[in-house]
Image (tube, rainbow, N blue to C red):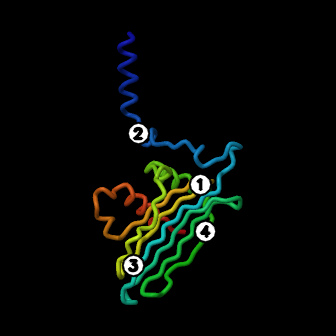
Amino acid sequence: MHKIIYLILLILALELPSTSTKKMNHSILKNSKGHWKNLTISLNENSGSLAPEFRYTLYTSIVANKEGFFIYRKESQADKEIINSKKRISEKNYLQIMNKLLNLNVYELPIELEPKEKLMGVSYNLFSLKIGSKRSQFYYLLEDLKNSQFKNKKKIIEIMKGIKP
């Protein structure tokens, strides 16, 4: 009888969707009193010094503070502003975004210093995170996105680029 129960439990455990194991402990996002911590996560990407018709910039961020949860996005192409928008989002939407990022261990990334080597005509792009007093950040070049060792950071960048007000 115990073997049958064990077998049933094993089958049920195997059939659980993988997202159930990916649920995050939101204590990372809350303080000891259960209040949301101040948070800013941002991505700042640009094409570098190209001819004006090929230039672009993208700044997107998620902010949590005492006023609520917000998404910001500022984007330009060929030196013309395409979007400059701020939107309040619900707690549910905030947690959906944060679950995606936290599942990629964004909270555990170290603080990388800006590379000292400056390349003519090339800009370093920046991802940064601040949750309460915890910080992390990394710099990247657009060509880094093609590198297989950059896979996790590329997913983080894709999530940030996909956030639109």
**Rendered location of residue 141, percent (x, y):** 36, 70
Furthest-top residue in view? 1
Apparent side of residue 40 relative to residue 100 in the rendered image (left or right) = right
Give the residue pinned by disc 3: 47
Q: Nearer the viewer, mark 1 or mark 4?
A: 1
Q: Which residue is mark 1?
A: 131
Three-letter amino acid code of the residue under disc 1: Ile
Q: Position of residue 44 (x, y in %)?
A: 48, 71
The first of marks 3 and 4 along the sequence is: 3
Disc 2 residue crowd, few under 14, some 14–19, many 20+, Cα 10 Å: few
What secondary structure is marked by label 2? loop
- Circle 4 sits on which residue? 87
Q: Nearer the viewer, mark 2 or mark 3?
A: 3
Residue at left offset 31%, top offset 69%: 143
Q: Amino acid at mark 2?
A: Pro
Q: Earlier in the sequence, mark 1 or mark 4?
A: 4
Residue 87 is left or right of residue 10, and the answer is right
Asked if residue 16 is positioned above or below residue 48 in the image, the reply reads: above
Measured Cα–Cα span from mark 3 to mark 4: 25 Å
**In this view, the mark in front (3 or 4):** 3
Circle 3: residue type: Ser
Q: Of residues 134 and 68, which is closer to you in this image?
A: 134
Q: Residue at x 57, y 69 (%)?
A: 72
Residue that mark 2 sits on: 17
